[in-house]
Amino acid sequence: MNKKELTYRKKDLLNTIIKGYFRVLNFTCLQLPLSDSSTQLHHKTYNKIRKSSFLPSDIIQEARKDIWKLKKVISKKLLQDKSKINLNNCSIRLNKRWFKFVLTNKGYPCFKLTYRPKKTFVVPVEIDNQFNRFTDYTKNGWRFDNISLLQNGNIAIVLEKEFEEPEITQHNILGVDIGSTTLAAVTIWDSKKGKVKKQLYLGRDVALRQRKYENRKSKLKSLTDRGSGQAKKSFKRLKHKQNNFVKTRSGQVAKELVNLAKKHKAYVAVEKLSIKGKKHKFNKKANGKISRIPYGLFNQFLKSNCSISEIPYYQVDAYHTSKNCLGCGAINPGHVSSNYSLYKCKKCGRVVTSDRQSSLNIAVKSFLERNLQVPTLRIQYSRKPIPVIGLLRPNDVGLAKSTV
Ligand SMILES: [Zn+2]
């Protein structure tokens, strides 16, 4: 994108930034022949650069990665003549932390770049064909996470778009509750008949094995603290083994789930959890437990397996999915205090396994989110429809009521 004409002060600043970046590049280049890996290059350059340069660490690291990518070309040139390295085509790559696309009060677009901690540099953008094309793309769902500041102050943008999700045509829903005792509690619910077709647990072994690993690790840790080198080695090996185990099992369980979805012609629904949500969900009982639940990893496997098999993957808002009673629609605090795995409704007295209910709630909620006009639903347990509005946030409920 083309920049608007910069003021003299800004031109000066731009020059300083670019020069600062070149110093980093040059220094990194000169260390290149002495390094066998990108990490080694990092160790050889990073601290020295940090001491002398105002540039933020991310940018320095990006520079090092760029140099490493070009190592063959650069090494060859270094052999010929050190002064001949031509870095004129280089640009400064900035990730989301270091730039913001903003509109000025008068509505002019510009990029706000952070070139050193707490110091920003604003590049106003010319509203021309290039800019119009950019806005057309972003309107159509294209996103950008990285930009490059070119030496003349213009800005290059890499636009990305995720492939279209497969459309949901299935009326069967496979709801998954990812939890700390069972990796995946699963309910397959037929939204047409309001019937639960299947409920099962997958990956129960993961939590058990994880606990064993953790116990063994804490023993080795205390031995290490007392100075045992052998224990330190064993600890490392064990940690590696644990990571592999979790990865393998997460992949297997995700695959199993997707096969189930295929077999039952269902789409997959899981909770969308923020970090806060995860803590809330998993930390009720024991702190530190969260680190043992491979939520992100498992979710990733699930998502990619779904997309390979062209099964829709749907994320529901986690609001009230563990609190809503599917027998009467009441909202309860959640778990029975004497038994964490049980859920008891104070209104209708129903007692159920909490993760089974959560996984059904997730399936039901995904249907609800897609059909906001349905305030009651028939669900397995009763003959008459159950109010399900409690699953929605108050704002969404307003939306649902207005269409009834
Ligand atoms: Zn109830």
Image (cartoon, rainbow, N blue to C red):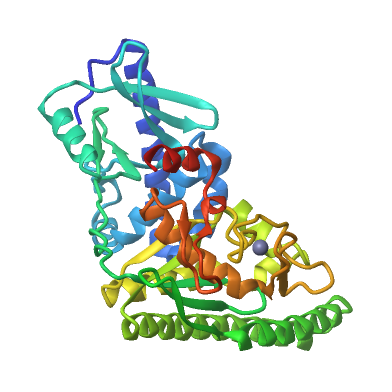
- Total of numbered circles in the picture? 0
Q: Position of residue 297 (x, y in %)?
A: 50, 71
Q: Residue at 32%, 11% (x, y): give it.
A: 106
Q: Quadrant of the N terminus?
A: top left
Residue 335 showing in the rendered view: yes
The answer to whether 94 is drawn above or below residue 234 in the figure is: above
Q: Quadrant of residue 314?
A: bottom left
State the image coordinates of residue 99 (x, y, percent, origin top left). Answer: 40, 34
Instruction: Give the left or right position of residue 209, taking residue 258 as reference.
Output: right
Furthest toward the right, the residue is 226
Q: Position of residue 251 (x, y in %)?
A: 45, 82
Residue at left offset 46%, top offset 86%: 252
Is residue 293 among the parts visible in the rendering?
no
Q: How far across and down, in percent of the image, does residue 289 sit? A: 71, 69
Give the answer, above or below, for where 325 lies relative to 249.
Answer: above
Residue 50: quadrant of the picture: top right
Q: Nearer the viewer, residue 54 or 185?
A: 185
For image coordinates 59% across by 75% down, the residue present is 356
Quadrant including the C terminus: top left
Q: Nearer the viewer, residue 173 or 82?
A: 173
Residue 157 sits in which quadrant?
top left
> Where ligand 1 lies, by image quadrant?
bottom right
Give left or right: position of 351 versus 14: right
Horizontally, residue 65 falls left or right of residue 90, namely right
On screen, residue 65 versus residue 165, left or right, reads right
Work out whether 136 lies above or below 5: below
- Toward the left, the furthest residue is 129
Residues 347 and 336: in front is: 347
